[in-house]
Image: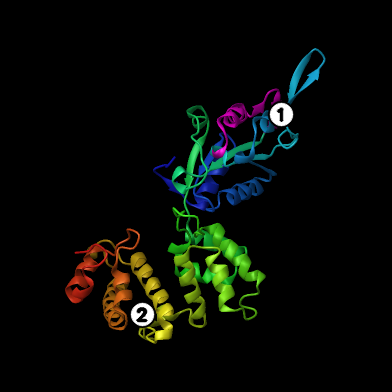
Amino acid sequence: MNLSFSVTQNELLDVLLNIAPIRPVFIWGAPGIGKSSLVEQFAETVGLPCVSLLGSQLAPEDIIGIPQIKGETSEFLPPKMIARKEPYVLFLDELNACSQEVQKAFYSLIHERRIGEYHLPKGSVVIGAGNRANDSAIVKTMSSALVNRMFHVQLKADSNQWLQWAYENHLHPWITDYIAQRPDHLFSGAPKTEEPYSTPRSWHMLSDALKAYGAGEQEIGEEILRVLAYGSISANHAGMFLAFIKQIGNKHLLSDILAGREKWPSKPEERDILYFVAQSFRARLLRELPESKQKMSKEAQNLTHRAKALIKELSQINHEIAQMVVSADEGEMLPEWFMVEIVRDLPRLANYGGFQ
């Protein structure tokens, strides 16, 4: 399922606080985007314990329990994990990865908050979550009856909110500094091949790995850093992250270049640093240049004039990297009015990335 509207982490928490106590909520989102941690945060906020069940590992009897003879009749005894006396948050993770039989077992639990004769304690909350079919994850079609029993919301990654969480949870400063400069690298989406890719979870994993090796507090080899980065996040992001670490002593290099206090790195051994700074430069232009030239602030006008000069200087150092700055990277194009001016001033860069 792909909903036409997505919410950020803070917005999802607000939805859960208002909707989940009265209706079961299903959270859609890519693997590693933070669905589980947000449910745990919600449970902590409302002061309830959180019980998580992994749909992909459940059999029907794990939900409805097993029968027990009682006199001349039998009754089902629900599992101890579910049959609690005090209210709690029941989190059904990977709900759309379980079999149709398990989905059927969830019907009354989700709709009526009961299993056979057992009713969830008053004040309990039921929340489901799952990946989408286009996330290259294990998913099964949810029955229309189950879909119709839940309120649906789709989570998206928000770099500002994630950074706030990362600072509060003391992630490695290399991670927070990098994402602060390249917020577009927080989430890359699942690749078609089996390889690491960037998500909030994988950046957290890389942070833990860096801390385990004492990175930043002691010297660790470049090869180890490569292993850690390429084993956690997408290859493209890993390469730029390593370049970022090389120039971490001057983490304000891009700001200094924009202000005219520094020049583009131009030595052959600085090519990876040049590539990273140029990528950061492109990301800043995408973020700060308005779609319409008529809506330009004075700051945007100054950035436009400075950007054109810097792209010209960059093309003299490395034409390929200068082309990368103005290319259509993953469908993202710089504003058309800006590209028109680039075509006029730097025609050699014009026929690149689909812009004619």
**Front-lying residue, 72 or 287:** 72
Q: Is residue 287 left or right of residue 227?
A: left
> Count of labels shown?
2
Question: Which quarter of the picture shows residue 23?
Answer: top right
Q: Quadrant of residue 265?
A: bottom left
Say if the magenta span includes residue 252.
Answer: no
Give the side of residue 28 with respect to residue 282, left or right. Answer: right
Task: Please state which of the two labelled residues, at mark 2 or mark 1, is closer to the viewer.
Answer: 1
Q: Position of residue 276 (x, y in %)?
A: 42, 74
- The residue lying furthest to the top in this view is 72
Image quadrant for the C terminus?
bottom left
Residue 258 numbered mark, or none: 2
Relative to 252, say whether 328 is above or below.
above
Residue visible at 57% across and 72% down in the picture = 173
Left or right: residue 208 compared with residue 28: right
Q: Earlier in the sequence, mark 2 or mark 1?
A: 1
Disc 1 designates what residue?
65
Q: Label 2's element?
A: helix
Start-end of magenta stretch: 97-122
At label 1, which amino acid type do we have?
Answer: Gly
Foreground residue, 265 or 155? 265
